[in-house]
Image: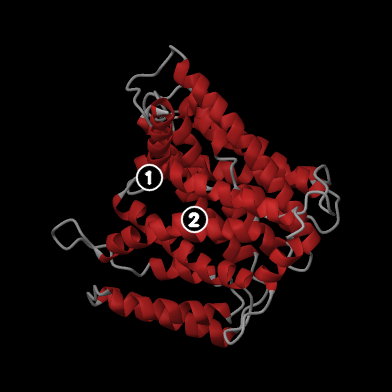
Amino acid sequence: MARTRHLAGRIARALSRLAHGDAGAGLILLACAALALILANSPAAPAWYHVLHGELPVIGHDIHHWINDGLMAIFFFVVGLEIKREVLDGELASPARRRLPVIAAIAGMAMPALVYLFVARGAPGMASGWAIPAATDIAFAVGVLALAGKGLPSSLRLFLLTVAIVDDLGAVAIIALFYTAGIDLAWGGAALAVLGAMALCNRMGVRKGAVYVPLAVIAWYCTLHSGVHATIAGVLAAMTIPMKLNGVGDSLLLRMEHALAPWSAYLIVPLFGLANAGVALGGGAQALGTLPLAVALGLFIGKQAGILGAVLLAEKTGIAARPAGATTLQLWGVAALCGIGFTMSLFIGALAFPASPALVDEAKVGVLAGSALSGALGFVLLRLAARSPAQGAGGEQA
């Protein structure tokens, strides 16, 4: 009995460490994605669909809509805060520090798109999904790295984070430029006016969140009606939040990011996974169809080929050095992890085929398959690299 209690205590402590470390958000997201798949393939599927898509009384729309267009705006707001912090005072603050992550992220978005277009060539109606495999899921990728990361140089985690941040910025730009059907000039103008007012408040030295939060909500509401996807308002609003330190290492941006990041990682993104990852695997979505195959291969082959190839080419040409102490096997493992495209890929998939739920489901199958294969390969490669005696200098736990 004592031995059983001791084992249970060890398991509980291990789970607690995972939940509070980098792996925690990824594990919660994985659990929600698994639950979504179970519900979509169970007798409860019709009832679950009604829960997600039944119109809500009084406020209108459905839960799925409020998660994707409402809560995800907060997720994108946090992404915007993180990007601004990194550009002004982080790993993207100087040309030398951002050169390799930017090159790797651009190649890691272009190559999956090319793989997708090659596989889907000639298939009618598929071209609009080219951006689905171009994204990287930070929570999942960093979570798998944390699970596999004993004995790996800390520079790998920093490299993965900065690539994913640049990747997020690219995904936001893609959504704004390529997945906006038409713009209502009145609503769009109103959104820009509110965002301009927020920028003016910043210029005037306003440092109170009570001023920026209501204006951000108004900007979101105007953007929602403008034809531009409402989540773009989250990123643009974040860019107006003051970053200037107040002399004690504090700022409104840092306080907002610190307050909202846990809600985004542990509640909003898992809810998004729960609402969007479900697909009836025995139904119309064919795992070996053109669309699922194009998405899966884009994530699994395109991501690692683009990122690893860009890093090795940049090193060979002297444009940028690889992360300190990292071996080629470790870099390959991190490049494979970047093929976990879950959250942003599912999000773009819904935007790419708004009039075809069947194609959205097929895209989901490709995202799930490509992300699972990428995560598994990345984990295996990093574990092999951690056990290899050929460690680079400066190896430490990532």
Q: Is residue 313 visible?
A: no
Q: Confirm or deny contact between disc 2 and disc 1 (CB under 8 A).
A: no
**Residue type beneath disc 1:** His
Quick one: which residue is furthest to the top in this view?
389
Is label 2 or label 1 in front?
Answer: 1
Q: Is residue 318 left or right of residue 378?
A: left
- Quarter in which the C terminus is drawn: top left
- Find residue 299 and report its horizontal and vertical position in percent: 65, 41
N-terminal of the two: label 2 or label 1? 1
**Residue type beneath disc 2:** Leu
- Quarter in which the N terminus is drawn: top left
Quick one: which residue is furthest to the front in this view?
1
User: Which quadrant of the structure image shows residue 218?
Assistant: bottom left
Q: Is residue 108 left or right of residue 20?
A: right
| Tag 2 residue | 169
Q: Residues within 10 Å of mark 1 (few under 14, many from 20)?
A: few
- Find residue 28 and report its horizontal and vertical position in percent: 51, 49
Q: Residues within 10 Å of mark 2 (few under 14, many from 20)?
A: some
Q: Is residue 371 above or below residue 255?
A: above
Q: Which mark is drawn over residue 240?
A: none
| Tag 1 residue | 20
Q: Secondary structure at mark 2?
A: helix
* 265 or 353, nearer to the observer: 265
